[in-house]
Image (cartoon, rainbow, N blue to C red):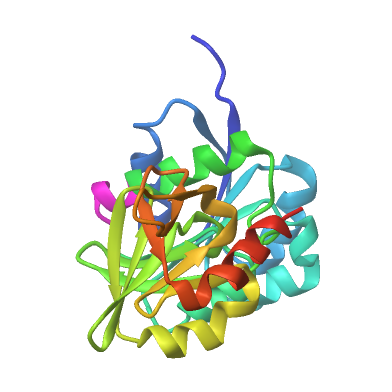
């Protein structure tokens, strides 16, 4: 039987929670649980001895919390982190700590599979979760989801909401496009027109229609018209990419 590609550490003070993560991971042969921890001190020791690629980390543990572990270890020296908690109010703080995902217990099989898919993509890319910086936290039927800005293609206005498009899927966020632009506009997003905010790195090319309109073609194949008023600034942003 081939060995797993990635090593997993499970940290939770509840034995049932650790057992539940083991059972969920068993369905994914690329991942192998190499250790379990009951508190933050054990996690710090296991990170050095077991050298996991991923840690499923509870937030509230005896002694040191999950956030304390990251603070002491420093984010740059952490493996990929998936927070596992019974509370949803720490999601934004979790991303600030460079977590790849945030799972609220009890975790469904479908939600866990989505996390594993994201982990697989991230680990194979060789990048660190926090390198691109920034994320948006959305609520879905499956629970709270952290969407890194680097995975977003574009965002469109939907009345008092913003619809975030990523990988062919979309999520509604209860925030206006204008407020969102103020928050992430300096993270590589530029207005294409009044109702569309585009991640510049997702632009594959700019083209002009027979009618003389400018269109941004995204790597996903989506075509976003660029208004005449914003055309010069948008094109300059595309040309300025590294």
- Judged left or right of residue 154, residue 40 is right
- Judged left or right of residue 53, residue 61 is left
Which residue shows up at 24% across the image and 54% down it? Answer: 108
Of the pair 45 and 194, the residue shown nearer to us: 194
Total marks in image: 0
Residue 55 percent location from the top left of the image? 58, 52
Residue 158 percent location from the top left of the image? 24, 78
Rendered position, 201 above or below 139: above
- Judged left or right of residue 197, residue 48 is right
Rendered position, 171 above or below 51: below
| Residue ranking furthest to the left | 141
Q: Is residue 163 magenta?
A: no
The magenta segment is 106-112
| Residue ranking furthest to the front | 211
Asked which quadrant contains residue 26, the reply is top left
Any part of residue 106 in sight = no
Rendered position, 4 above or below 213: above
Of the pair 28 and 153, the residue shown nearer to us: 153
Residue 89 percent location from the top left of the image? 41, 84
Asked which quadrant contains residue 8, the reply is top right
Which residue shows up at 72% across the image and 41% down it? Answer: 50
Of the pair 156 and 224, the residue shown nearer to us: 224
Which residue shows up at 63% across the image and 38% down it? Answer: 125
Asked which quadrant contains residue 153, the reply is bottom left
Which residue shows up at 19% across the image and 65% down it? Answer: 141
Rendered position, 96 above or below 198: below
Any part of residue 111 in sight = yes
Residue 12 percent location from the top left of the image? 50, 62
């Amino acid at each position: 039987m081939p060995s797993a590609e990635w090593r997993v550490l499970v940290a939770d003070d509840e034995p049932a929670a650790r057992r539940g993560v083991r059972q969920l991971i068993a369905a994914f042969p690329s991942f192998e649980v190499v250790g379990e921890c009951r508190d933050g001190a054990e996690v710090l020791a296991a990170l050095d001895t077991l050298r996991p690629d991923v840690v499923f980390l509870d937030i509230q543990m005896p002694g040191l919390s999950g956030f304390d572990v990251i603070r002491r270890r420093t984010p740059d020296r952490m493996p990929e982190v998936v927070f596992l908690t019974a509370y949803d109010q720490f999601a934004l703080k979790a991303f600030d700590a460079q977590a790849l995902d945030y799972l609220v217990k009890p975790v469904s099989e479908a939600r866990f599979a989505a996390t594993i898919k994201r982990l697989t993509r991230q680990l194979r890319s060789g990048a660190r979760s926090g390198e691109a910086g920034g994320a948006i936290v959305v609520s879905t039927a499956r629970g709270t989801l952290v969407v890194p800005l680097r995975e977003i293609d574009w965002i469109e206005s939907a009345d008092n909401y913003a619809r975030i498009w990523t990988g062919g899927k979309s999520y509604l966020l209860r925030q206006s496009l204008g407020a969102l632009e103020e928050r992430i506009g300096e993270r590589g997003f530029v207005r294409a027109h009044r109702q569309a905010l585009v991640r510049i790195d997702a632009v594959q090319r700019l083209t002009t229609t027979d009618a003389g309109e400018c269109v941004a073609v995204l790597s996903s194949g989506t075509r976003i018209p660029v208004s005449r008023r914003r055309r010069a600034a948008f094109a300059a942003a595309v040309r300025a990419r590294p």
